[in-house]
Image: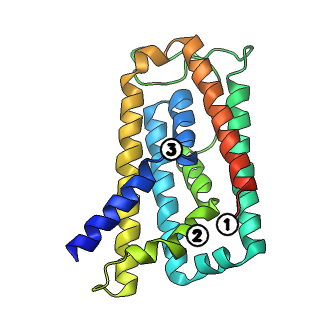
Amino acid sequence: MLTHVAAAVGVLGLLTVVPGPDMAVVTRRALSAGPADALRTVGGIATGLLVWGALTMAGLAAVLAASPSAYLTVKLLGAGYLVFLGAQALWQNRPAAPAIATRPGSTGARGSTGARPTGSPWRTGLVSNVLNPKIAVFYTGLLPTLAPPRLPPTLAMTLLVLLHAALTLAWLGSYVFLLSKGERTLEKPRIRRALGRTTGVVLIGFGLAVATASV
């Protein structure tokens, strides 16, 4: 069984570290609101994985993955949300955007330029993940093939979902830590605006990719 678990961790780890919408959403939050908000966003993303895991074990994710109309609806909602976040990042980092001073003595990549994003960072991570129908396909298609055969199916899927959430927390949490280490560079308004605009473009690109992707 340990061999199957190790293999599952390897596959889930590779899928976790591949840059995607989650990393772009976390980057946007880190640049505009600081590492604390970014970590809350990571928590929302991990919670979204747990939601998908529960839906998978309840059979709802399989229905979504098998229903073209339901899949299309969630796909377009998810794509629209990513495009919205990207457009918001571009607007907040426009040349005429007002500057926001950091609090005295504060550290971290808190926005010195551009507007602080509105809304709960945890909810932002949760919504961006729950509206990603690719996870439904992944959890109903690939994930069962990674399940240790000696465990009951429900227990095996629960283990894999928890592993996936833990790996996501570890990877994106480490990424936020690395971003915070570059706080002095990120405090420069010109660099922050450039990174903010780049993140906005990347989010819009991911949104368009999700909207045009096939199952």
Q: Earlier in the sequence, mark 2 or mark 3?
A: 3
- Residue 103 in view of the camera: no
Q: Secondary structure at mark 3?
A: loop
Give above or below for 31 relative to 69.
above
Q: Residue at x 69, y 37 (%)?
A: 86
Give above or below for 128 relative to 214.
above
Q: Residue at x 55, y 44 (%)?
A: 121
Which quarter of the picture shows residue 145? bottom left
| Foreground pick, 17 / 110 | 17
Q: Residue at x 37, y 66 (%)?
A: 162
Given the image, on which type of amino acid does mark 2 rest?
Answer: Val
Q: Which residue is mark 1?
A: 215
Q: Earlier in the sequence, mark 3 or mark 1?
A: 3
Quadrant showing the N terminus: bottom left
Instruction: Report the Cα–Cα distance between label 1 and label 2.
Output: 8 Å
Q: Which residue is mark 3?
A: 19
The x and y percentages for residue 209 are 69, 49
Q: Secondary structure at mark 1?
A: loop
